[in-house]
Image: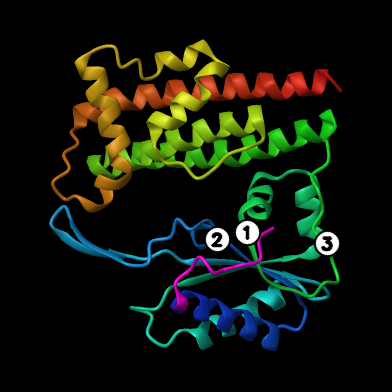
Amino acid sequence: MKKSISHLPKRKQEDLIFLARQVRKQLPEAEMIILYGSYATGKFVEYDERVEFGIPTSFMSDYDILVVTSGITDREAGYILDKVDDHYYKDPDFQTPVQFINDDINMLNRQLEEGRYFYTQLKKEGIILYDSGRFKLARRRKLNLKEIQQQAQEYFDDKFENADGFLDAGKFGYETQSYMIASFNLHQACENYYLAIRLVFTLKSNRQHNLSKLSASVKRYSEELAKVFPRNNTEEKRLFALLRRAYVEARYNHKFQVTKEDIDALLPKVEMLRDITRSICEQRIREYGDMV
């Protein structure tokens, strides 16, 4: 894991040094403080102000910080980190936001040993801001088939439930004639169905909202998936493009147009994706069990 934040602007370095000192001062049970996310990878947005769809907007990336503790409950640590958060902010409109998460060292190492995708990515890309030196981060070990099956089932249950919730919200939007909001929820349903497939078949994932990339990443797992959004004529291409754009435009572009007929056409496609996802994921999870 990296140890230098020299790639960041001086003001950002000063912020992170201040935050790490405050955490150590107020939370002596902190064993490691790890910067992850866009500021660790150098892909951060320092400040961006633009007009989107006629609406002035601004954006800046957060500092994502994992505080690893020992000898204290997550609840107690979270309460203290909230106080650090409050002490840090002087002008929330212009300061870089900070997002703390905290984990006990034993739990963190268990997640790393099992190769949980969030934690392995964090270890790969993260930057150590503080290390007490009392603990070492675990290495990923080879999972047995029973563990693989268990992880796949957990990921499937989580993402599939999320997707079904978004699908239900999409149907409610349709029933209340809120077609633009319905399109956003249908996008989110598809995103989570695709993520369920990726996680079940690979136990890996990343942050991705682009349906074109998501659908391409899972198509090898079933020929049936190509039938959901075939894009073999102008109308099919238009429908898929509308659904893909809904992630942003349904929330921010008041001129984004979605009709009842659009949702009429999209709903059965999302339901087809749901059924295919359930079928191939449950089959894959059974196969893991058969190999035990």
Q: Measured from the top left, where is residue 230 in percent x and y?
A: 35, 15
Circle 3 crowding by C-alpha within 10 Å: few under 14, some 14–19, many from 20: few
Question: Mark 2 or 3 closer to N-term?
Answer: 2
* Residue occupying the point 80% across, 23% down: 289
Real-space Cα separation, disc 1 to disc 2, in angstroms: 6 Å
Mark on residue 61? Answer: none
The residue tagged 1 is 126
Q: Secondary structure at mark 2?
A: helix
Residue contact at pointers 1 and 2, CB within 8 angstroms: yes
SS assignment at label 1: loop
* Quarter of the figure that contains the N terminus: bottom right
Whichever of callouts 1 and 2 sits on the residue coming sooner in the sequence is: 2
Q: Find the distance from the CA under tag 2 to the CA under tag 3.
A: 20 Å
Looking at the image, which is closer to me, 55 or 190?
55
Question: Which amino acid, by three-letter code, is at mark 1?
Answer: Gly
Q: What residue is disc 2 on?
A: 40
Residue at which label 3 appears? 136
Residue 87 x, y percent position in the rendering: 52, 88
Amino acid type of disc 2?
A: Ala
Relative to 229, say whether 262 is above or below.
below
Q: Answer with the quarter of the image where residue 206 lies.
A: top right
Q: Position of residue 241 (x, y in %)?
A: 27, 30
Apparent side of residue 234 relative to residue 240 in the rendered image (left or right): left
Residue appearing at x 50%, y 32% in the figure: 193
Query: Position of 41 compared to 251: left or right?
Result: right
Q: Given the image, on which type of amino acid does mark 3 rest?
A: Lys
One can see residue 178 in this view: no
| Magenta segment | 1-10
The crowd level at tag 2 (other Cα within 10 Å; few <14, some 14-19, many 20+) is: many
Vertical comparison of 121 with 235: above or below? below
